[in-house]
Amino acid sequence: MNLRINKKGFTLIEILGVIVIIGLILIVAIPTMSRMIHNNNNQEYDNYNKLVREAAELYASKVKDKIGSSKYVGCAEVDLNTLINDGYVQEFNDTEVTCTTGDGKIKIRNNKGSIKVNFQLICKRGTKEEYNTGSENNDKDTCTAYQMLEENNIKMKLDSDASLGINTPTGSKETYITSGNNYIWYSGKMWRIVSYNNTTETVKIVTENPITSIYYNSTGTTTYSGSDVETWLNNDFLNSLKDAPTFLTSYSWNATANTDINTNKSNTNSYKKNKVGLINTYEYGRIKDWYSADGTWLMTDGGYITAASSVSQTSVTNIQPIRPAIVIASDVLVHSGTGTMNDPYIIDNSANAVGKQGEYINTRFSGEYVQLNGKKYRIISVVDNTTKIIGTTSIGTYSFDNDHFAYEASDLNKNLENTLTTEKSYATTGDFCLDTINGDPAVYRSSKCLTKLNSAIKIGLPQIGDLFTTKISGVTSSYWTLNPNQENDGTGQAYSSTINVITNQGTSNTSTISSSNATVIVLHLDSSVKISSGKGTNASPYVLTK
């Protein structure tokens, strides 16, 4: 049998076709593989850059003598070789690659505990540069050892400010500040420095103005412990303060041991260790020029309650204004301000000391000022996402109907609809009568609200217990409150012809409903209202937008 063998091979054209196909595959594959290798190398370099940064941050704890702690600012420099030699980081894991830090320096800056590391990392394979990130040009400033912040702390400001009136009575543990640039802006409220305690190294501050008008104790008890004032201060008011649990220092709110002011006699019933308290008559004697005739409650002295206007006995069941006092550590930092009323020290612990553009107003604090349509208001409270504000000037004088002392919500809205433009569009409906600051209307209002008040309206009047109802700018006479003085028969018919008012001293009184009194309005802001500008202070109120 004969076998035939085919000896025919590939043609030249077929061979060329295969070569072309392989070439095309290589054209596509080689760049892809090159990119993969390059990306893999870059990832390694990025990882090493991160390791160097973490090593420098760890090294920061070793050089606190240069950069300081959380209360200081400072800078230190280190080179990569030092970090490698000291075991903070290893050399790059490729022996053919050398990584260095630009000018050889890694700068470690501390700003009040915030550590920032800046350097340029360059990696070369032989003479070929393969990686370059960061820039030493971003940080040209020379490193200097740590120092206190420019504004320093409260104690250092007191020591350095020659304008302050300093009074240190013989044998006293307190240095009293009697005048000068001692204004502080904290948690939306203006305060003044009362004294520095040399033993505890603390600073006592008191609100510049009374912030509410309430009973000292509706049951008639004269001791501070368990009083309505103490309860309100260390519950409602304390909870309204920013960072209060950590920012404030507990203090013994009894009278001091000094007796060179006749009215000062320690009373053990006054003793209470709280975050918030009142000043005593001895302290009032040192700083009484700060007080006008506002009748502010003081600490119990000698078994009875005193009022600042005359430092004399006042019935504990009277409604008087109060000025809270708190104590802060002397090393609390001053972030800005010169201590004047228009430029007070700002001592908040965070960047949230003042609001920012675009921030919702319901994230702010009671006491801060806002502006609507050229009129200035002040935040009373922020509760359940509702911001309640009160006018700082009177919008006119009104009388209640002589036959009815019921507050007709529709009448006030109707009378003011031509006056209020932006205010009405920014306000939301709110139950002004039932909106209390502490949930207990029996203590802070003289009687129950009228049925007609329990309607959803946009414009209301302040209650006796509302914050910042005292010292309303521009109001020289008494102004109406929302609080009826007597019960009614359900139709609005009054049993008497009087209604409660708050005087320009901040105390409560009654007035005939036919009398003309100033009107200060209260609004509930819509939750969509935002800050467009301003700092929230009296001199620079928040301008609002929707």
Image: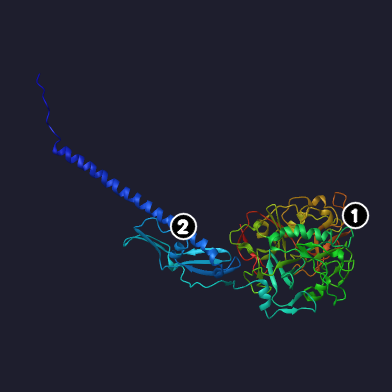
Q: Locate residue 368, reporting x and y percent.
A: 68, 64
Whole-angstrom CA distance, mark 1 to mark 2, is 80 Å
Nearer to the camera, 529 or 106: 106
Few, some or many C-alpha atoms within 10 Å of disc 1 (few <14, some 14-19, many ≥20)? some
Residue at left offset 12%, top offset 31%: 8
Q: Say which quadrant the C terminus sits in.
A: bottom right
Residue extending furthest top?
1
Q: In the image, 404: left or right of 388?
A: right
Q: Which residue is mark 1?
A: 495
Q: Locate residue 516, reporting x and y percent.
A: 82, 65
Q: Tag 2 or tag 1, which sits nearer the N-term?
A: 2
Query: From the viewer's perspective, is residue 479 above or below residue 527?
Result: below
Q: Locate residue 256, reporting x and y percent.
A: 82, 71
Three-letter amino acid code at the position of disc 2? Leu
Residue extending furthest bottom?
162
Dot 2 falls on a residue whose secondary structure is helix
Dot 1 falls on a residue whose secondary structure is loop
Residue 421 shows in the view: no
Residue 107 shows in the view: yes
Q: Which residue is mark 2?
A: 51
Nearer to the camera, 251 or 534: 251
Nearer to the camera, 285 or 529: 285
Three-letter amino acid code at the position of disc 1? Tyr
